[in-house]
Image: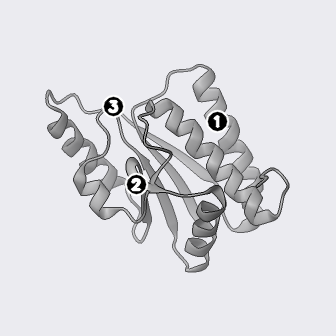
Amino acid sequence: MRLILLCVGRCKAGPETELSQRYIERANAAGRALGFPRVELREFDESRAREPALRKAAEAKTILASLSPGARLVALDESGALVSSREFSAFLGKTRDEGAPALTLAIGGADGLSGEILEAASPIVSFGRMTFPHQLVRIMAAEQLYRAMTILAGHPYHRD
């Protein structure tokens, strides 16, 4: 199953980009034997619309247009469910076992994700009730993908 980390907003070269890439590379190495050939990072420019609602609507169109047929969509949003790393790992394994061709994790821009994306997503996952910059959420999502691979593989990286 393909894993796609879809990000509204582009990261500039620097430590945030390097760290997210490091976790993506680790997830790729760990995931191949588990039926996850690679984590693909897709970045889109933030909308330049003047109002937040218009920006979110334009970004939603871009997100929805980029989804592969049959792909599951996971929205990363502060309004979502709080899940443990083991629960997230189990979700990835179950989605793979059900035959989904791809799973897309969507990270919104500065204004977050639109209601249209939140309605299309199942599940909506939160890293906490605080607001985080999208660059940090990208790192956290990449690390959780790597951690999920290690949990599925029985590797000791994750400790309860």
Q: Earlier in the sequence, mark 2 or mark 1?
A: 1
Tell me the amino acid under the disc marked 3.
Ala
Q: Which residue shows up at 58% across the image and 37% down it?
A: 139
Q: CA distance from mark 3 to mark 2?
A: 17 Å
Quadrant into which the N terminus falls: bottom right
**Lateral position of residue 4 relative to residue 97, left or right:** left
- Report which residue position mark 2 lands on: 80
Q: Mark 1 against mark 3, which lies toward the viewer?
A: 3
> In the image, is residue 98 above or below residue 118?
below
* x and y, in percent, of residue 145 in the image: 63, 52
> In the image, is residue 38 above or below residue 52?
below
Classify 10 Å Cα crowding around label 2: few (below 14), some (14-19), many (20 and above): some
Q: Which residue shows up at 82% across the image and 64% down it?
A: 154
Q: Are marks 2 and 1 in contact (CB under 8 Å)?
A: no
The one of 158 and 134 positioned closer to us in this rendering: 158
Q: Dot 1 lies on which element?
A: helix
Q: Earlier in the sequence, mark 3 or mark 2?
A: 2
The one of 41 and 97 positioned closer to us in this rendering: 97
